[in-house]
Image: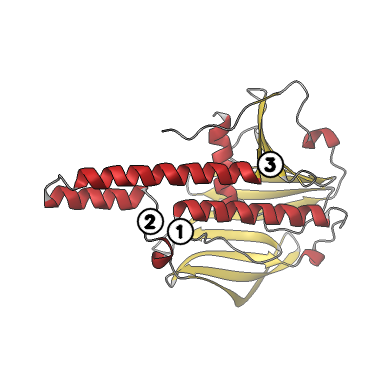
Amino acid sequence: MNLSTNLSKTLLCTLFGSCCIYSVNVMADATITFEEKDPQYSGQNIMLLKDGKVRFTASEQGNSYSIYNSQNNNITHVNPMQKQYLEMSQKDIEKQANQAKQQMEMMRKEMEARMKELPPEQRKQAEQMMSNYLPDKAGEKNQPQVKQVKTTRSETIAGINCDVYESTINALKVSESCITAVDKLGLDKQDMNSLKKMQVFMKDMQQAMTDFTGKENVGADVEGLPLRSKLFSRDGQTIMETRLVSINKDTVAAEKLAVPTEFTPVQMPQMPQ
């Protein structure tokens, strides 16, 4: 996979909660390991914490990884196979989202002009296709009713107690997370402020995506660490589960949270015309 593809996987993982580790006030040094599985696949998401930096690797990224640096408030995606890295600031992400939004609007106007020339039946099919692939023009008027509530259920995962929260969209249950308070984890608080910055960074990135798609993010927004999360299909079947395996508090090598000096930077990919 190239850098832009891998980065997209990282962003999606962040935005839609498949990694379930980004609204966290967890401290370094630590290695946090999650198991992720769906009906066809299983793997691990690993998060390293040290010196105000956070390195995370999603299970499907192979040996590629991303690093958040709280000192300059940016994120770097590293591809060891290609010996390249892509560094992105919040402004870079907002710029990409704005470019995509502008190009989608141009595409919409062109398609609407062409649809006027189609017979009624074909025009209806084209309108349906456009609604599936382009952001909602109505935006806020068509926002789904997203709710997240704390249930009376609790669980113990990897020896840590957590409370279960359920998320619904238009009254349909789409996910649940078992979340614990940070003070139950017993981790060093040295990098608390750095990870708070990361949480703000990720939320701002979510907002940029919301502005682009015209659809509200439906991920969990509860402070703490999700020890277990599930995503459900419309018929209630589990389509993905992420569960905490372990929290290791051994020292993390500093070089694991640094880009190798021989790697070369690449520019932000331009949005296709």
For label 3, the crowd category at 10 Å Cα-Cα, with few meaning under 14, some 14 to 19 and many 20 or more, is many
Q: Is residue 18 visible?
A: no
Tag 1–tag 3 contact (CB < 8 Å): no
Which element type, helix, strand or loop, lies under badge 1?
loop
- The reply to whether callout 2 and callout 1 are in contact (CB within 8 Å) is yes
Residue 182, horizontal then vertical, whole percent: 78, 64
Q: Quadrant of residue 71?
A: top right
**Residue position for label 3:** 75
* Residue 136 point in image, percent of width and height: 38, 56
Position of 158 with respect to 243 (left or right) is right
Q: Residues within 10 Å of mark 2 (few under 14, many from 20)?
A: some
* Quadrant in which residue 22 is drawn: bottom right
Q: Farthest left residue?
A: 119
Judge from the rendering whether residue 56 lies leftward or rightward of residue 148; answer left or right: right
Q: Which residue is tagged 1?
A: 215
User: Label 2: which residue?
Assistant: 136
Q: Please, what secondary structure does the residue beneath circle 2 have?
A: loop
The residue mark sitting in front, 2 or 3, is 2
Task: Tell me if residue 216 comes above or below residue 113 in the rendering.
Answer: below
Please state which amino acid type lies under the numbered disc 3.
Ile
Model colouring: secondary structure
